[in-house]
Amino acid sequence: MVRYVMEQMPGGLVSFERLWRQHFLDTMKSRFLPTGWSVEHSHDQLMCLEREVMQSVKKPDSKPDSSC
């Protein structure tokens, strides 16, 4: 699924997560979210995952980038 979202959706995983979080808010109408929860939270981990997936596609036998 990660590869599919990265290839098919403009903005990749970050865009997908933002869309999903907004859908969650709109649908569930939650009143009890944890402090700091937002649609626009830090996306550093997703961007790192995208880099790792892209590296594995280019070089299937290579180890993931440990800089994340």
Image (cartoon, grey):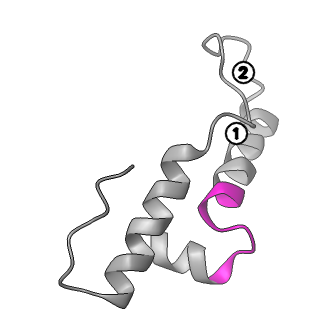
First to last magenta residue range:
8-16
Residue extending farthest to the right is 26
Instruction: Tell me, for residue 14, which label it has, or none.
Output: none
Instruction: Say few, some or many: other residues with alpha carbon within 10 Å of mark 1 (under 14 / 14 to 19 / 20 or more).
Output: few
Instruction: Say few, some or many: other residues with alpha carbon within 10 Å of mark 2 (under 14 / 14 to 19 / 20 or more).
Output: few
Q: Nearer the viewer, residue 66 or 37?
A: 66
Residue extending farthest to the front is 67
Residue 64 shown left or right of residue 4 in the figure: left
Q: Mark 1: which amino acid?
A: Phe
Magenta stretch: dominant SS? helix
Above or below, comparing residue 42 to residue 47 in the picture: above
Q: Secondary structure at mark 1?
A: helix
Rendered location of residue 14, percent (x, y):
65, 55
Rendered location of residue 6, percent (x, y):
58, 74
Q: Quadrant of residue 33?
A: top right
Rendered location of residue 47, percent (x, y):
55, 56
Asked whether the beta carbons under mark 2 and mark 1 sit within 8 Å of each other, the answer is yes
Q: Is residue 20 visible?
A: yes
Q: Residue at 72% across / 31% down in the picture? A: 28
Residue 6 shown left or right of residue 66 in the figure: right
Rendered location of residue 66, percent (x, y):
29, 54
Assess whether residue 14 is covered by the magenta stretch. Answer: yes
Count every numbered label the image shows and give the total: 2
Mark 2 vs mark 1: which is more N-terminal? 1
Q: Is residue 1 visible?
A: no
Q: Residue at 76% across / 38% down in the picture? A: 27
| Residue to which mark 2 is pinned | 30
Q: Residue at 72% across / 28% down in the picture? A: 38
| Residue to which mark 1 is pinned | 24
Q: Quadrant of residue 62?
A: bottom left
Q: Residue at 32% across / 62% down in the picture? A: 65
Above or below, comparing residue 59 to residue 12 in the picture: below
